[in-house]
Image (cartoon, rainbow, N blue to C red):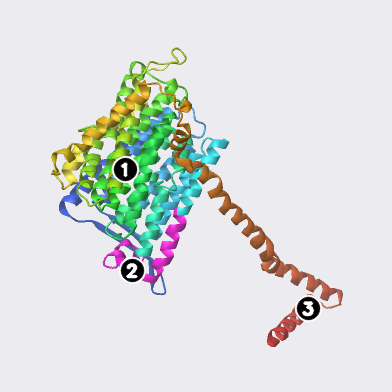
Amino acid sequence: MLLLSIWNLIYMVFFTFSALMFTSSIYMFGNSFGVYFSWSIFSWGSSDIHMIFLFDWVSLLFLSFVLFISGSVFYYSGEYMEGELNMPRFIMLLASFVGSMGLLIFSPNLISILLGWDGLGLVSYCLVIYYQNYKSLNAGTLTVLSNRVGDVLILLAIVWMLNYGDWSFLCWLGNSDSLILVSLLVILASLTKSAQIPFSAWLPAAMAAPTPVSSLVHSSTLVTAGVYLVIRMGWVYDFWMNDLLMILSVLTMFMAGLGACFEFDLKKVIALSTLSQLGLMMYSLSLGLVNFAFFHLLMHALFKALLFMSAGCIIHGYKGWQDLRMMGNIMISLPFMSSCFVVSNLALAGMPFLAGFYSKDLILELSLMEELNFVSLFMLFVSTSLTVAYTFRLIYYVVQRDYVMSGSSNISDGWGLMMKSCIGLVLASIFFGALISWLIMEVVAVVLPYYLKNLTLMICILGAIMGMFMSKSGFNFSKNLFSPIVWFSGSMWFLPYMSSQPMSFIPLATGSNISFLGDMGWLELYGGQGVSSYISKISLSFQNLGLNSLKGFILLMWIMMIIMMFF
């Protein structure tokens, strides 16, 4: 009873602060103002080091969603992690994760952003290796090394901005032409955090973490940090980087959608769907649709958290089993969680009048009004069709199909903490799309020709038909003549192999050689420790000659001065 009251208290605290920030955000948006807090720490030359916090409608609204989802995840963990011996450590890691994200959200300064950015990377490593085995260790190592690339790029941007005497995003205003290199470094860093090609391999590998952690990571914290950082500097990058961002995001969407159609691990399918939606956000940013990318970021956080939590409840009922081929017919044993699972999947697919529809359909229709080449537009709509295909495939395997392992487990829809924690998220996934679009979005309607207006609907229907065909036909891809192509598509275009072996082995081996030759080599002989050892030997030699240490030291200094005079 005491433990239950603690989880209720945590949820109420998070929910109260979330509601307060949501109300403040809408008030700031309506009155067009924000609060800029700057605290000068010290000055160095012509540069001033400030700790800056920016409280505006964007940061408050995003943090309100983060706190709402985090409270639901904490409440959900009370039952999912029941019996965990290190529960205080788990709670502290989750709290550190949310705190690092809050620091990143409120900071328009690259130095303070680095604190939250690096904090997310460190805590995510601790959470991925929470279950201590070799698989978790490999996944955690891949995660932290991939994110470390982004940390290095942020450090390079900080060093370059030393030329301007300020590290705040506000110095970009009116000075964007001279800060193209910094913009390039920040965007490349965001690609690592948001797992765009070629840094996509770590996102499915991070599924080694507990399911509540995956729900928090994939909805509103770690993977959204890169997108949010680009949104924050969205008025800056109007140069050739847009084309590169568009190419990488479209390829990421297509790769993730294709891989999810051949994947049978439940959590990896959802992870690949996160990768696909992150690609859509980056694509909209490459078109300059900053507000719409932020809108989709908020909506995606809601239904993706619900999707992971409902999938975690299903996995919990199957005693940790995650293979789709061994699941089925949970609408009988878990009616409420199957409803949550279907609602979140349909919101992901862009079902009309759910949360994902208002943001996703808007981005697709606005992209038809831009001056784009046919290839990128074709890839965008094909990726959207693949999203609907693997969504309906997932619904068929988990909810509709007959249970192939009948009698092997005992799962029931008990009204516990996991069920209660999903109520707020399922309501938000249904109603918040319309609510946020009425409150903060300025576009009311997009006028297009008849065939273009219905193009998105036709693509989604085609994807649903393809997904049901892939599920019900029983087509064995492993015996197909095109099995090498299927293997290539289902393995994320071999990115996990390249990331975990040659791409990581070469820098690690180079670093080992540098350490062996440098720190443990000539620096060891001619550095401080080597010089100290050499002086000790000379002092011992002077003592053998009958001189004490002070006289020997003075004599050694005279010898060194004479040598320096000659050189």
Type of the residue with mark 1: Met
Where residue 511 sits: x, y (%)? 59, 56
Residue at 56% across / 54% down in the picture?
Answer: 507
Q: Are marks 1 and 2 in contact (CB under 8 Å)?
A: no
The residue that label 1 is drawn on is 379
Task: Kindly report which numbered mark, 1 or 2, lies closer to the viewer in this rendering.
Answer: 1
User: Which segment did they paint magenta?
Assistant: 150-179
Q: Is residue 1 visible?
A: no
Marked residue nearer the N-terminal end (1 or 3): 1
Task: Kindly report which numbered mark, 3 or 2, lies closer to the viewer in this rendering.
Answer: 2
Marked residue nearer the N-terminal end (3 or 2): 2
Q: Is residue 35 above or below residue 396?
A: below
Task: Kindly report which numbered mark, 1 or 3, lies closer to the viewer in this rendering.
Answer: 1
**Front-lying residue, 143 or 262:** 262
In the picture, the disc for residue 369 is: none
Where residue 318 sits: x, y (%)? 44, 21
Where residue 540 sits: x, y (%)? 81, 71
Q: Are marks 1 and 3 in contact (CB under 8 Å)?
A: no
The residue that label 2 is drawn on is 178
Type of the residue with mark 2: Ser
Name the secondary structure under disc 3.
helix
The residue that label 3 is drawn on is 552
